[in-house]
Amino acid sequence: MFRPNLQNEDHRQAWALLQAVPEGQKSAFLVRAILETERQEKLENTLRRILREELQAVPSQPVQQPEEAIPQEMIGFLNTLMDDE
């Protein structure tokens, strides 16, 4: 039997959802919710495993960022700031 702790927000939300289910359908609703949660967790774990395996197979090399020259306008601006000190 489900006995919610109404001090807990998750329990209050679950209780409200369960109360909205028509009488005679609550057990079926709970069974579907439990099974769906289990399926989602298995799917998430499977996806994580697959992604981890695939990422290990991809050679990783650091991306080289092109070195950008500092525009002359910026250098001039920086020089004026340094001159003010």
Image: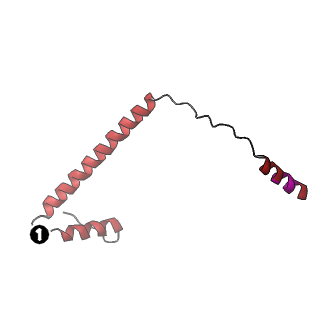
Residue closer to the observer: 49 or 4: 49
Q: At which x and y percent is residue 62? A: 58, 33
Q: Is residue 80 magenta?
A: yes
Q: Residue at x 70, y 40 (%)?
A: 68
Residue 27 drawn above or below residue 37: below
Nearest the eye: 6 or 56: 56
Image point (81%, 54%), residue name: 77
Q: Is residue 68 above or below residue 3?
A: above
Image quarter in which the N terminus is found: bottom left
**Within 10 angstroms of label 1, few (less than 14), some, or many (20 or more) residues?**
few
Residue at 90 percent across and 55 percent down: it is 83
Label 1 residue SS: loop
What segment is highlighted magenta in the picture?
77-82
The amino acid type, in three-letter code, at marker 1 is: Glu
Q: Does the segment drawn in magenta span residue 19?
A: no
Question: Picture quarter containing residue 85?
Answer: bottom right
Q: Is residue 11 left or right of residue 54?
A: left
Residue 84 in view here: yes
Residue 28 position, x and y percent, is 13, 59
Q: Is residue 85 visible?
A: no
The residue labelled by disc 1 is: 23
Front in this rendered view, residue 63 or 48: 63
* Image x and y of residue 23, in percent: 11, 69
Residue ID at (13%, 69%): 22
